[in-house]
Amino acid sequence: MLIEIPRTASNPQIPQITAEEASAAARAVIELFVKWNLGDEKAREILGGISPRTHARWKSGHHPRITRDLATRLSLLMGIHKALRILFSDAQRAYDWVSKPNENFNGRSPAEMMAEGSIFALARMRSYLDAERGAW
């Protein structure tokens, strides 16, 4: 017998992520960049060209208000991370994949692709990985 699982109620009165959610996502992405072994310059470009000072503040745990663009970037990065962890059973292989040249990207690494700075570069990477894993 099938039993319906109750759905989580949505709250359309909250139009954006909360400050707590944004701070958690920012902490996770900063840690992800460390695991991906990205330099500060690439990390700043992936985050939309944030300034060195802002990036340093993020790394020290001080997160400013997250704009819609940054929230979208953080979401895409977490989706990329999730897809990699599904594709690779060994976490380190997933982290290393980001910096290795890839023939599917004309010899460029995924990090180089994402560091183009465009939000579309992140969306393309997310779509590529979702297609590779079968979009489960």
Image: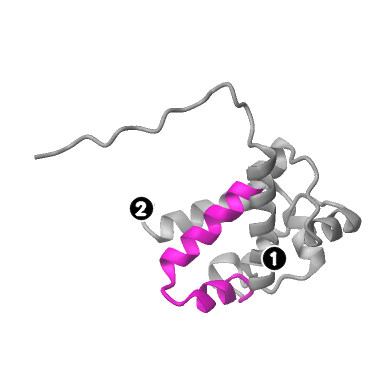
Q: Callout 2: few (<14), some (14-19), or many (20+) C-alpha neighbours within 10 Å? A: few
- Residue pictured at 69% horizontal, 70% vertical: 34
Residue type marked 2: Trp
Q: Which residue is mark 2?
A: 136
Q: Position of residue 130 (x, y in %)?
A: 45, 54
- Residue at x 72% of width, y 56% of height: 46
Q: Which color scheme does this rendered protein use?
A: one colour
| Placement of 124 over or under 60, stated as above or below | above
Badge 2 element: loop
Q: Secondary structure at mark 1?
A: helix
Image coordinates for residue 128, horizontal then vertical, percent:
50, 56
**Pick the front one: 118 or 35:** 35
Residue that numbered label 1 is attached to: 112
Foreground: 15 or 133?
15
Inspect the magenta stretch and tell me whether residue 76 lies in it.
yes
Where are the magenta residues, as a range? 74-100
In the rendered view, tell whether residue 85 sits above or below residue 13.
Answer: below
Q: Is residue 5 above or below residue 104?
A: above
Left or right position of 71 against 89: right
Q: Quadrant of residue 116?
A: bottom right
Asked if residue 71 is among those painted magenta in the image, a careful observer would answer no
Question: Which residue shows up at 61% across the image and 68% down it?
Answer: 106
* Residue 115 in which image quadrant: bottom right
